[in-house]
Amino acid sequence: MGKIIFNEDKNFQSHSYECTSDCADLHSHFSSCNSIQVESGNWMVYERTHFMGYQYFLRQGEYAHYQQWMGFNDCVRSCRMIPQHQGSYKMTIYERSDFGDGYWIFYEHPNYRGRQYLLRPGKYRRYSDWGAMSSRVGSIRRITF
């Protein structure tokens, strides 16, 4: 079970609202959000109600100002807890509509840094199938022609 606390002012001041489950409309609980404490779990917070608009992934920790979670403004209107997942993972990436395959580059680190791996159309059941030494993927870029 997760817990997230929204505060209207920076540095966890003023009115706060605690949430332990998905909430499609936070507007009635606070008018602005300038700081957040994630006590447990991983959360996605959204700029608009019903899980729409800009979205921000937050891990356990303290975010004293909306810029610390890369927010564009102090507007948070909905949130969703991300459940922990055990077991296998599967992802399918398509370049074109109607599931048209494309070419992708996986990077070992965020911001397109580190080792690069070209993924051509096909299935990759494990990271060694695309030549990687570990399952770490920090960023992904589509190859455009």
Image: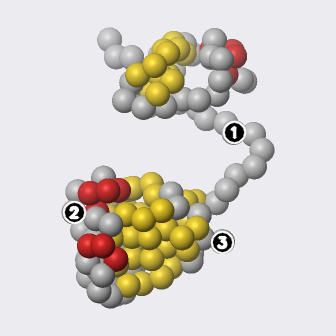
Q: Which mark is residue 134?
A: none
What residue is pinned by disc 2?
A: 73
Q: In x, y percent, where is residue 55?
A: 38, 56
Question: Relative to residue 103, is residue 77 drawn left or right?
Answer: left
Label 3 belongs to which residue?
A: 1
Pointers 3 and 1 in contact (C-beta within 8 Å): no
Looking at this view, name the residue that lies furthest to the front.
Answer: 11
Residue 115 versus residue 5 in the image, above or below: above
What crowding class fits label 1: few (fewer than 14 Cα within 10 Å), some (14-19), or many (20 or more)? few
First-in-chain label (2 vs 3): 3
Residue under the image location 45 percent in, 54 percent down = 57
Instruction: Using the image as rendered, state which of residue 121 and residue 23 is in the foreground.
Output: 23
Element at label 1? loop
Secondary structure at numbered mark 3: loop
Mark 3–mark 1 distance (CA, rounded to whole Å):
22 Å
- Categorize mark 3 by other alpha carbons within 10 Å: few (<14), some (14-19), many (20+): few
Q: Residue at position x 32%, y 66% from top? A: 64
Q: CA distance from mark 1 to mark 2?
A: 33 Å
- Quarter of the image with the N terminus is bottom right
State the CA–CA distance, disc 2 to disc 3.
28 Å
The amino acid type, in three-letter code, at marker 2 is: Asn
* Nearer the camera: disc 1 or disc 2: 2
Which sits earlier in the primary sequence, circle 1 or circle 2? 2
Residue behind mark 1:
89
Locate residue 101, reporting x and y percent.
51, 21
Residue at disc 2, secondary structure: loop
Pointers 2 and 3 in contact (C-beta within 8 Å) = no
Residue at the spot 52% in from the left edge and 61% down from the top edge: 60
| Residue type pointed to by label 1 | Tyr
Camera-near label (3 vs 1) is 3
Residue placed furthest toward the left: 73
